Image: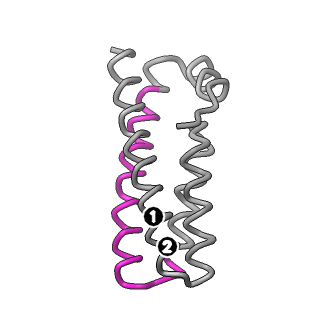
């Protein structure tokens, strides 16, 4: 996954290791909630909600320097807006995979920070 390591490092320097690790942990919890809501909105074919949710996922990814997550969320948004069910399914699957990697990265940061 593509990560803006400078942004992540700056966050740890600016906030301190413990606070930055806590922020990452809270952000990952938020990402989990957003992904669950997105899955529900997609299953219920609520395109407006899907676009809103992937916008929030994108913003979260941007704030943490998770470039791959932001890019994948953008892809879901485009697919939803076209109404192409196959594209939505494919981009959602990609977003899920990348979100899982984000969870692992956050877990690794938690272990490193104590």
Q: Is residue 46 magenta?
A: yes
Q: How many marks?
A: 2
State which region is magenta. Answer: 21-50
For mark 2, give the secondary structure.
Answer: helix
**Left or right: 9 with respect to 27?**
right
| Residue 55 at x, y percent in the picture | 59, 63
| Residue 42 at x, y percent in the picture | 41, 76
| Residue 13 at x, y percent in the picture | 60, 17
Position of the C terminus, as image quadrant, is: top left
Residue 88: mark: 2
Q: Classify 52 as above or below 22.
A: below
Q: Is residue 30 magenta?
A: yes
Identify the residue at horizontal 38%, vertical 15% (top origin).
Answer: 112
**Left or right: 97 with respect to 60?**
left
Identify the residue at horizontal 42%, vertical 31% (top origin).
Answer: 105
For mark 1, give the secondary structure.
Answer: helix
**Left or right: 92 with respect to 54?**
left
Check if mark 2's residue and mark 1's residue have beta carbons within 8 Å: yes
| Residue 61 at x, y percent in the picture | 56, 46
Identify the residue at horizontal 36%, vertical 34% (top origin).
Answer: 104
**Left or right: 8 with respect to 19?**
right
The residue closer to the viewer here, 75 or 64, is 75
Q: Image quadrant of residue 14?
A: top right
CA gap between label 2 and label 1 equals 6 Å
Mark 1, residue position:
92
The chief SS type of the magenta part is helix
Q: Classify 20 as above or below 67.
A: above
């Amino acid at each position: 996954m593509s990560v803006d390591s400078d942004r992540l490092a700056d966050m740890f320097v600016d906030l301190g290791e413990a606070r930055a690790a806590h922020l990452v942990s809270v952000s990952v919890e938020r990402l989990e909630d957003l992904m669950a809501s997105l899955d529900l909105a997609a299953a219920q074919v609520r395109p407006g909600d899907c676009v809103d949710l992937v916008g929030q996922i994108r913003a979260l990814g941007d704030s943490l320097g998770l470039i791959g997550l932001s890019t994948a969320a953008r892809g879901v948004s485009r697919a939803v807006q076209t109404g192409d069910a196959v594209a939505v399914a494919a981009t959602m699957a990609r977003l899920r995979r990348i979100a899982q990697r984000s969870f692992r990265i956050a877990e690794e940061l938690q272990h490193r920070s104590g």
